[in-house]
Image: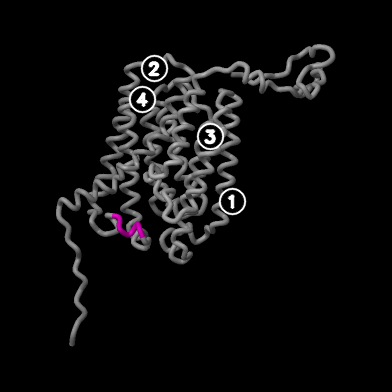
Amino acid sequence: MSTIPATPTPSFSLAERLKAHLQIARLDHSIKNLFVLPGVIVPLSTYPALWSAHLLWMLLLAFVAITLVACSNYVINEVLDAPYDRLHPIKRNRPAARGVVHTGAAYVQWIAMMLAGVGIGLLINRMFALIALLLWIMGCLYNFPPVRTKDVPYLDVLTESVNNPLRMLLGWYAVTAVLVPPVSLLVAYWMIGCYFMALKRFSELNEIGDRSVAGAYRKSFQRYTPESLLVSVLFYASTAMLFLGGFIIRYRMELILGFPLVAFTMAIYLKIAFKPQSAVQNPEKLYREPVLMASFVATTLVMAVLLFVRMPRLEQFFTPTLPAVSTPGVVPAAAVVPSGIVSGPVPAVAPAVPAR
């Protein structure tokens, strides 16, 4: 009686395994550390005296710490996703999915990188270390069952994208632990991250095509549709611009001049999401999109310059022209003609102007 021979277990050399463990840390994703820059630039634009030679050293430590914590999250993501990645037409070639990664060693790598990152963060200040630890915890919630938010529609996008404002906070606290970051800017940054992540999900779902295959690979795809993802993209983009506008009106009116570039960059990103094998699915490959990169660099430079430039006439142009809301005991403001020139007697109480 013949028996079916057992499938041989593949063996890998030490060099292959070491290379695989380096790969699952995804050092090429360090490009995402650019999301830290607004957290560095905004407080410096508000209080230039924070700039010093010591700050350069702190920023270097911050970059290393953020990279280590992010890589720790990538390691555990790769290990826990290996069974699902084997069902994906492309991701099945990842080291963990092919069995090259030693699971026990990967868990040690995961913890060691986190401890090193948070430990370096303590050299900067406690708030930086706390946010770095929170970034790591969010990675755990995203990947580990029974929570595993990446399997829940919409929650997967919201929890993964919260890394955006966390990265901004890491940049902020690398510069100062005294100034308080504006909530409006943090929410805008969060929603921008959701916009990018929802388009990534949309592109992935379109690329796989077969809903049953997509649902086996990622549980959230069992309930997502291309239409529902595009609707969510519109929501995230609108919310992001609402809060970014609130930040601009409240703190730096000059940034409104950069809005066309922001909108153009977001439009290009949306267009790229419809391409076959889109780079949107792998953000570390977006550098291959020259138009997007040119628009992104131009937007970043213009917004950074506008943070340091004051244009009083621009603020005057956007001075409120409607009368202030009257309250009991307060003389109502005078009528305002369409040109913005006040007619009639001078109001007893001047219209409120947003504090800056």
Q: Is residue 166 visible?
A: yes
| Badge 1 amino acid | Val
- Is residue 207 or residue 173 the one in the foreground? 207
Look at discs 2 and 4 and give the one toward the viewer.
Answer: 2
Q: Quadrant of the N terminus?
A: bottom left
Q: Magenta part of the protein: which range?
A: 90-94
Foreground mark, 1 or 4? 1
Distance CA(mark 1)–CA(mark 4) = 41 Å
Q: Nearer the viewer, mark 2 or mark 3?
A: 3
Q: Amino acid at mark 2?
A: Trp
Residue 34, image x, y percentages? 40, 34
x, y percent for residue 97: 30, 58
Q: Mark on residue 51?
A: 2
- Viewer-proximal residue, 225 or 255? 255
Mark 1 Cα shell of 10 Å, populated few (<14), some (14-19), many (≥20): few
Q: Are marks 2 and 4 in contact (CB under 8 Å)?
A: no
Residue at the (53%, 31%) spot, across then down:
185
For disc 2, the neighbor class at 10 Å (few under 14, some 14 to 19, many from 20) is few
